[in-house]
Amino acid sequence: MLAQQQSSPAPLVKAEGITRVFGRGPAAVHALRGASLSIPAERLIALRGRSGSGKTTLINILGALDRPTEGRVYFNGNEISGYSEKKRNALRRKEMGLIFQSFGLVPLMTAYENVEFGLRVAGVKSSLFKDYAESALEYVGLKARMKHRPFEMSGGEQQRVAIARAIAHKPPLILADEPTAELDSKMGAQVMSVFKDLVRSEGMTIILTTHDPAIMSFADHVYALEDGQIVEAT
């Protein structure tokens, strides 16, 4: 009897022929030109490329922050590229965590309050706020600093608060645009170690953009973009 072939796992995120054009006519800018990729769950994925290569546009489309001009995006088996703005907002709040290089923390809020605010936005029950927020801050090593405000923290600590806010509601997908760009190499490595542990221990999938070879070394797979196209996958 022939041995049964093992089917590959269904991708958590899939993009098919993604094109994104900004503007019209001679002034039109083609940020993406038919990009396709398939990302399984529980992976750390890096999108690399120079400024203007299309990596930020791609991560914004994968994270339902933008729509493709052409092509389709699937999340957990559902096509999301045609979702209304309301449905895309709900998807991001509940199923995704977003991290940006500018940290995006509310300056007058403590670390705890910043994470709690993220839980409110995600629609988590208020009875779970304390447990979820403290657990997330403990995970990134900042529970002892949870009453400090951003201006009382280093850049690396602020980025770890941003990570805690993104993971507190336990989303399956984290998207991070140049999350280590404002950090030195030591702090960047600490952030990437947290990401690796989130994939390994919490079963999350993380997609990030970077142009730093040291950061790419942490990734399970790297997609290289050039002039809006994926030119290499390793």
Image (tube, grey):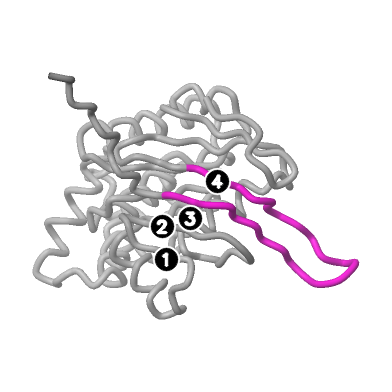
Q: Which residue is mark 3?
A: 62
In the rendered view, does 146 fall on the left or right side of 62? left
Q: Which mark is residue 80?
A: 1
Q: Earlier in the sequence, mark 3 or mark 1?
A: 3
Proximity of marks 4 and 2: CB atoms separated by less than 8 Å: no
**Label at residue 36:** 4
Spatial separation of the CA atoms under disc 1 and disc 4: 15 Å
Work out how far the residue at label 3 is from the one at label 1, CA to CA, in angstroms.
9 Å
**Outermost front residue:** 1
- Disc 3 marks which amino acid? Leu
Is label 2 in contact with label 1 (beta carbons under 8 Å)? Answer: yes
Q: Is residue 48 left or right of residue 78?
A: right
Q: Earlier in the sequence, mark 4 or mark 2?
A: 4
Predominant secondary structure, magenta span: strand
**What secondary structure is found at the residue carrying circle 1?**
loop
Instruction: Reply yes or no: does residue 26 show up in magenta.
Output: yes
Identify the residue shown where x is 50% and y is 43%. Answer: 37
What are the residue bounds of the magenta stretch? 14-37
User: Regarding mark 3 in the picture, which secondary structure is present there?
Assistant: helix
Q: Which mark is residue 74?
A: 2
Label 2 CA crowd tier, 10 Å (few <14, some 14–19, many 20+): some
Label 3 neighbour load within 10 Å: few <14, some 14-19, many 20+: many
Name the residue: 40% across, 41% down. Answer: 39
Q: Is residue 95 above or below residue 139?
A: below
